[in-house]
Image (cartoon, grey):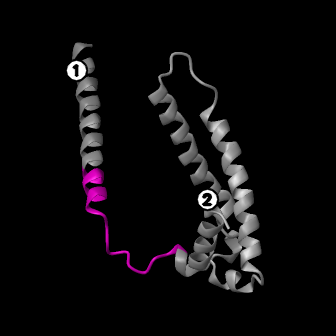
């Protein structure tokens, strides 16, 4: 079983344990799913990377290819490895502990709110200047 098959088995165990329990031959199922996912990942990686770019350095090419591989893996994880949405348990969709919030997200939200307020204030000042000139 390849890495995609092992990852799919872990995802199913966490999000759809009842469906996982119903699979008779897990090794065969996740081996095939992993092979399908790997093929999709390979093709999508090539498609997302695209052709070599004129004037592209070796390091830029490595970055472009690695970025394409990571994006392709995210897409394959979401579209191929996840169990059907009808089998996902509702407990996994809504965590019980909603009190915990990442402090960096709070900081980002405060910063974004302040930025938006400043932009609105600038727009209001500009509008009032335009009215004064009229």
Residue beneath the point at 52% across and 41% down: 66
The one nearer the camera, 72 or 28, is 28
Image location (x, y in percent) of residue 126: 26, 24
Element carrying mark 2: helix
> Residue at (70%, 74%) from the top-left corner?
86
Residue position marked by numbered label 2 in the rendering: 77
Instruction: Please state the horizontal and vertical placement of residue 121, each as a whole percent of the image.
Output: 24, 35
Residue found farthest to the top: 134
- Left or right: residue 32 versus residue 62 is right
Q: Quadrant of the N terminus?
A: bottom right
Total residue callouts: 2
Q: Secondary structure at mark 1?
A: helix
Foreground of the two, 2 or 53:
2
Q: Nearer the viewer, residue 104 or 44?
A: 44
Q: Is residue 56 above or below residue 61?
A: above
Residue 114 appears at what percent x and percent y?
Answer: 24, 45
Binning the other alpha carbons within 10 Å of mark 2 as few (below 14), some (14 to 19) or many (20 upward) gives: some
Q: Which residue is mark 1?
A: 129
Seen in the picture, residue 53 relative to 87 is either above or below; the reply is: above
- Nearest to N terminus: mark 2 or mark 1: 2
Q: Residue at x 61, y 47 (%)?
A: 72
Q: Position of residue 21 (x, y in %)?
A: 69, 86
- Residue 54 painted magenta: no
Task: Please determine whether, in this image, residue 113 is positioned above or below residue 61.
Answer: below
**Corner quadrant of residue 89:** bottom right
Q: Quadrant of residue 33?
A: bottom right
**Residue range (magenta):** 93-110
* Horizontal side of residue 15 vs 22, given as left or right: left
Q: Residue at x 32, y 75 (%)?
A: 99
Apparent side of residue 25 relative to residue 91 in the rendered image (left or right):
right
Location of residue 38 by image quarter: bottom right
């Amino acid at each position: 079983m390849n890495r995609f098959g092992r990852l799919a088995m872990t995802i199913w165990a966490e999000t759809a344990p009842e469906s996982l329990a119903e699979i008779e031959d897990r090794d065969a199922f996740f081996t095939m799913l992993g092979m399908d996912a790997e093929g999709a990942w390979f093709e999508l990686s090539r498609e997302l990377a695209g052709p070599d770019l004129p004037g592209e350095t070796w390091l830029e090419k490595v970055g472009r290819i690695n970025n394409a591989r990571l994006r392709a893996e995210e897409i394959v994880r979401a579209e191929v490895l996840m169990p059907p949405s009808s089998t996902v348990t509702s407990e996994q969709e809504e965590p019980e502990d909603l009190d915990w919030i990442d402090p960096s997200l709070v900081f980002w939200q405060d910063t974004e709110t302040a930025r938006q307020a400043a932009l609105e204030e600038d727009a209001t000042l500009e509008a009032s200047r335009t009215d004064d000139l009229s």
